[in-house]
Structures are given as structure tokens and as C-alpha cells.
């Protein structure tokens, strides 16, 4: 996009673009958010007032009021943007591509907002007991590359270690053996038994701050484990790409899986959390695991995909992803 132009009118050409900048979607949205926050700070220091008319005692009077600060996002294009787009697209395709970009930007804003909220709150709930190395055991380190513990800080028992082991066997059999990857990452699996995750209503969690996965036995343990390991895969591949998550990149296979999953859910989702790219990717990994292990996903779970659509459009991409991990 151009950062400066000598001409903003309909007849502007490439020669009028003094400076240009090429960025990925992460940086574009982060930059927009930065300038939005600057504008908000400026407004807070000097709020804007306006005049409106109110009918009082039989006559109209001018009344001063405080205007609310609003972020006005627009789907329109300037002539500078339009003429710049003509360099890359046929004119008939410009608006189609612009609409697709605006949709991607909308989801990226959600991703960034929730990611910031997650990071800012990650140390405020006492996770050290739940997800740190304290009271971990190495019984599964040699074979599976993970340290394990109980989330409540008590010493984990053999029966619980066996449950985690069986879940990892199922995951490795379904996908591929990632023990060496887990060992290098320093993965901790924190088991909460029949309780939700610490200070949350979730039955599973992935914490990049602690290199840990939290899993409960509420529902299907193996299914929950596959979902959280999906987050880890997304994070590790993203780290190699210098991104938060690989699913943030629409050109990467992880991003393609996330986008297709979001577009093909049983019911269109309105929840920001459920539309989040990394959540769509993790649910795709989870649904792949369920299909391969004959675990039923109810039609009432409308934030998952129709099986037929998943098998046709997403299943082959997950298989392709697995090949890159072997």
C-alpha cells in the first residue's frame, strides 16, 4: 500500500506514489491498531464536542455534547488504492480481492485482540503451580518426549501417567511420532483429572508461556489432547516462520486449513473465540483425530464441520501437513 502520494484523484498513476510499503497481514493489522491507539490517546487528552438541537419549552435550542470516540473502519477504497490494485489485478477482480482482504483483516483483528488479552492475563492467575516444572516427573520423557504432572500441584500417580501415555500413543498413531519435537520444546502435560483448567472454564489449554498443555478428563481425554497438541503444532511451525501461529499465514497450509474450516462449519459462528484462526486449526486437527479414531462429533456441535465437507476439503490438507512433519 502507498504511504504517500502526490495525487489522490481519479487520474493518479504509479508515478504519483512517492513511498510504498509491503507488509503481511499481521503487521498491517498491528499497524492499524497502533495508530488507532494513538488517536484514542489524543482524543482522551482533548475530547471532541459537537452541537445538537433539542426541543425545549416550545422552541429549538443548541446544546453542546461530548462526541464518543469511534473507530470507523471502511470497506471503501481511495483512488490511490484502486489504481495501485490495477497493477496487480484485472479491473473486474479488484473489488472481489478487496472484499476477501477485508474479511481476512476482520478475522486478523479478532486474533490479535484475543492474543493480547491472553498474554496480558497469563501471569495473573497463578499458573506457576498448574503449568510450571514444579512436581513434574520424567516417566514419559524417553519414549514420548514429555514431562507430566498433576495440575493441582500434588505428585502424579501411575494410573494418571498411564492415561496420558495412552492418549499420546493414540495421537502418534493417528498423526506421526513427535517425541523428539516435544523433547526439544520441553513440553509439559498438566493433568487436571475431572476439573476444568486453572481459573478457567476450559477442559484443555495450551500455554506457550510455560511450554505446557493442560488436559482434563471432562469429555473425551484423547480428543481434548489432540486439540491442544494441534495448538502446539500450529505454534511450533509458526515459530519457525517468525509468526505467533502458522495458521495466521493464509498462504501456509495451516492457514488454509483454518480458513476452510471456518468457512465450512455446520453453522456460521458469531463467537470471536470460535472464529479465531488458531482455534479453527486446532478444531480441524481434533476433528481429523476423531474421524480416524471413530469418535463421534454430534451435529449439535455446530462449530465443527459437516463430516462430508471435512473429508472432501480439509482431510487431504491435514494429510499433506502430516507428511511435512515426518
Image (spheres, rainbow, N blue to C red):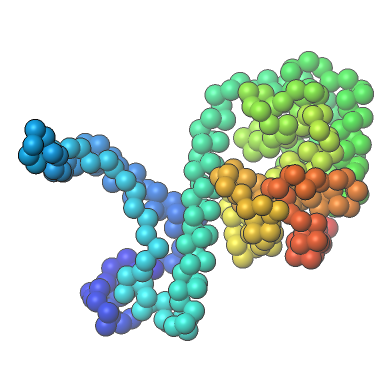
Residue 36 is situated, as x and y percent measured from the top left of the image, at 34, 48
Q: Is residue 137 visible?
A: yes
Examine the image and state in which quarter residue 261 appears.
bottom right
Q: Residue furthest top?
A: 154
Residue at 45% x, 76% y: name it.
94
As drawn, is 43 to the left or to the right of 282? Answer: left
Q: Residue furthest front?
A: 58
Q: Nearer the viewer, residue 110 or 246?
A: 110
| Quadrant assignment for the N terminus | bottom left
Q: Is residue 317 visible?
A: no
Examine the image and state in which quarter residue 85 appears.
bottom left
Q: Eyeballing the image, is 312 above or below 214?
A: below
Q: Eyeballing the image, is 47 above or below 264?
A: above
Residue at 92% x, 30% y: name it.
162
Q: Nearer the viewer, residue 160 or 137?
A: 160
Residue 13 is situated, as x and y percent measured from the top left of the image, at 30, 82
Residue at 77% x, 32% y: name it.
215
Q: Eyeballing the image, is 268 above or below 67?
A: below
Residue 232 is situated, as x and y percent measured from the top left of the image, at 71, 44
Residue 117 is situated, as x and y percent measured from the top left of the image, at 51, 36
Residue at 45% x, 54% y: name it.
29
Q: Nearer the viewer, residue 130 or 196?
A: 196
As drawn, is 182 to the left or to the right of 8? Answer: right
| Quadrant assignment for the C terminus | bottom right
As drawn, is 296 to the left or to the right of 29? Answer: right
Amino acid at each position: 500500500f502507498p504511504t504517500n502520494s502526490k495525487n489522490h484523484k481519479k487520474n493518479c498513476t504509479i508515478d504519483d506514489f512517492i513511498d510504498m510499503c509491503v507488509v503481511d497481514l499481521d503487521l498491517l493489522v498491528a499497524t492499524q491498531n497502533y495508530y488507532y491507539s494513538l488517536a484514542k490517546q489524543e482524543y482522551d487528552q482533548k475530547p471532541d464536542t459537537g452541537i445538537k438541537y433539542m426541543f425545549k419549552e416550545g422552541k429549538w435550542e443548541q446544546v453542546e455534547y461530548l462526541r464518543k470516540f469511534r473507530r470507523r473502519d471502511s470497506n471503501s477504497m481511495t483512488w490511490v488504492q484502486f489504481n495501485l490494485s490495477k497493477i496487480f489485478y484485472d479491473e473486474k477482480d479488484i473489488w472481489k480481492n478487496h472484499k476477501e482482504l477485508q474479511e481476512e483483516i476482520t478475522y486478523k483483528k479478532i486474533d490479535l485482540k484475543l492474543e493480547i488479552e491472553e498474554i496480558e492475563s497469563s501471569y495473573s492467575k497463578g499458573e506457576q503451580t498448574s503449568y510450571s516444572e514444579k512436581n513434574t516427573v520424567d516417566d514419559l520423557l524417553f519414549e514420548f518426549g514429555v514431562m507430566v504432572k498433576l495440575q493441582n500441584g500434588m505428585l502424579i500417580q501411575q494410573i494418571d501417567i498411564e492415561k496420558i501415555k495412552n492418549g499420546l500413543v493414540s495421537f502418534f498413531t493417528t498423526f506421526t511420532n513427535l517425541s523428539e519435537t516435544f523433547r526439544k520444546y520441553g513440553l509439559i502435560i498438566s493433568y487436571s483429572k475431572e476439573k476444568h483448567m486453572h481459573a478457567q472454564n476450559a477442559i484443555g489449554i495450551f500455554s506457550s508461556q510455560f511450554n505446557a498443555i493442560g488436559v482434563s478428563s471432562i469429555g473425551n481425554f484423547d480428543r481434548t489432547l489432540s486439540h491442544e497438541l494441534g495448538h502446539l503444532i500450529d505454534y511450533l511451525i509458526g515459530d519457525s516462520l517468525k509468526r505467533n501461529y502458522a495458521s495466521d499465514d493464509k498462504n501456509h497450509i495451516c492457514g488454509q486449513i483454518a480458513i476452510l474450516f471456518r468457512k465450512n462449519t455446520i453453522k456460521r459462528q458469531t463467537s470471536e473465540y470460535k472464529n479465531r484462526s488458531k482455534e479453527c486449526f486446532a478444531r480441524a486437527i481434533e476433528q481429523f483425530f476423531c474421524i480416524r479414531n471413530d469418535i463421534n462429533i454430534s451435529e449439535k456441535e455446530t462449530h465443527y464441520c459437516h463430516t462430508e465437507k471435512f473429508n472432501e476439503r480439509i482431510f487431504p490438507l491435514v494429510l499433506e501437513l502430516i507428511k511435512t512433519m515426518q
